Amino acid sequence: MKLIANTQKPDELQARLATLIGRQVQLKLHMNQSTMVSVRPKEAHVLVNLHKEFVQASEPVIHSLADYIKGERGAKTVPLKRFVHEVVCGIDLSSQGKKVGSAQGVYWDLQALYNDLESKYFDTPLNLHVAWFGTRKRRKMPKKSTLGLYYDMRRMVKIHVLLDNPKVPQYVVEYVLYHEMAHAICPAEVTRFGKVVVHTKKFHSIEEQYPLAKEAEIWLHGNMHILYPSQLKRWF
Ligand SMILES: [Zn+2]
């Protein structure tokens, strides 16, 4: 089931919920992850506190949320729970990629690069969303960062805006993007010791099929300081 849809305005979401539950709704959006949803019935309306990510919830999730507001706690709330789980994991993973950003950067168009890679190197369409994430502002940069992220449930790839830079060669942006796309066809494996391996041997063999993989690795090792002078411990 698709959990994420196009972003809607908060007042649209408020009106949608009011229609679905048949009562006035006062919607308040927040960024607090510990209580993603809270419902307080008032005399004339229902006060609903929601995490901001709900503005991009899909129709089934909104229906499920409406059922939850009405007091439903059973199977009907499964899409809602899945959405909450996904949002919490997503935020933890990137610690900054809080919203679905655009694929059009200032220098590189991720969607165009994605389409090209998909048709050249993958047998079947991957149907992934692709977006930039992160900030160029130094003071806001996290201590550790990643250049690319893959979200399996969201079918989404995010690339750090640090790479949206004219100093970064196209093959480097492509390589990071390709790496994340490869996750979509190569699931993590659990070893007999119970360890989860994301970058498996099979994964690396797929990764090497990008013709400039080695050159891109060399560029990244030698040039990351240009974009991000310190602290970048893990790349992707
Ligand atoms: Zn990876």
Image (cartoon, rainbow, N blue to C red):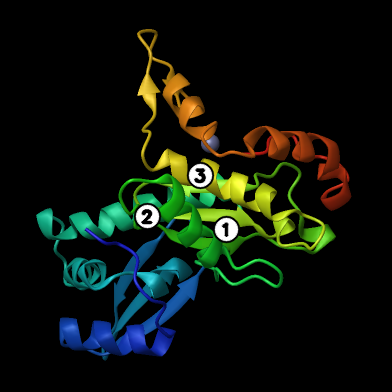
Q: Quadrant of residue 214?
A: top right
How many residues crowd around disc 1 within 10 Å: few (fewer than 14), some, or many (20 or more)?
many
Residue 146 at x, y percent in the picture: 65, 44
Q: Kindly identify the amino acid type of the residue bearing the numbered disc 2.
A: Arg
Residue at 15% x, 87% y is: 22
How many residues crowd around disc 2 within 10 Å: few (fewer than 14), some, or many (20 or more)?
some
Dot 2: what SS? Answer: loop
Question: Which residue is labeled 2 in the image?
Answer: 154
Question: Which residue is labeled 3 in the image?
Answer: 180
Query: Disc 3, ligand 1: is the CB inside 8 Å?
Result: yes
Circle on res. 160 = none
Q: Kindly identify the amino acid type of the residue bearing the numbered disc 1.
A: Gly
Residue 218 falls left or right of residue 236: right
Q: Kindly identify the amino acid type of the residue bearing the numbered disc 3.
A: Glu
Q: Quadrant of residue 213?
A: top right
Q: Is residue 134 visible to us here?
A: yes
Residue 26 falls left or right of residue 28: left
Between marks 3 and 1 in the image, the one whose residue lies nearer the viewer? 3
Residue at 59% x, 72% y is: 104
Residue 132 at x, y percent in the picture: 59, 62
Q: Quadrant of residue 80?
A: bottom left
* Image quadrant in which the C terminus is located: top right
Inter-mark Cα distance, 2 to 3: 13 Å
Residue 36 falls left or right of residue 227: left
Dot 3: what SS? Answer: helix
Dot 1: what SS? Answer: loop
Residue 169 at x, y percent in the picture: 74, 53
Q: Is residue 31 visible to us here?
A: no
Instruction: Choose between 129 and 65: the one closer to the eye.
Output: 129
Inter-mark Cα distance, 3 to 1: 15 Å
Question: Which residue is labeled 1 in the image?
Answer: 97
Inter-mark Cα distance, 2 to 1: 13 Å
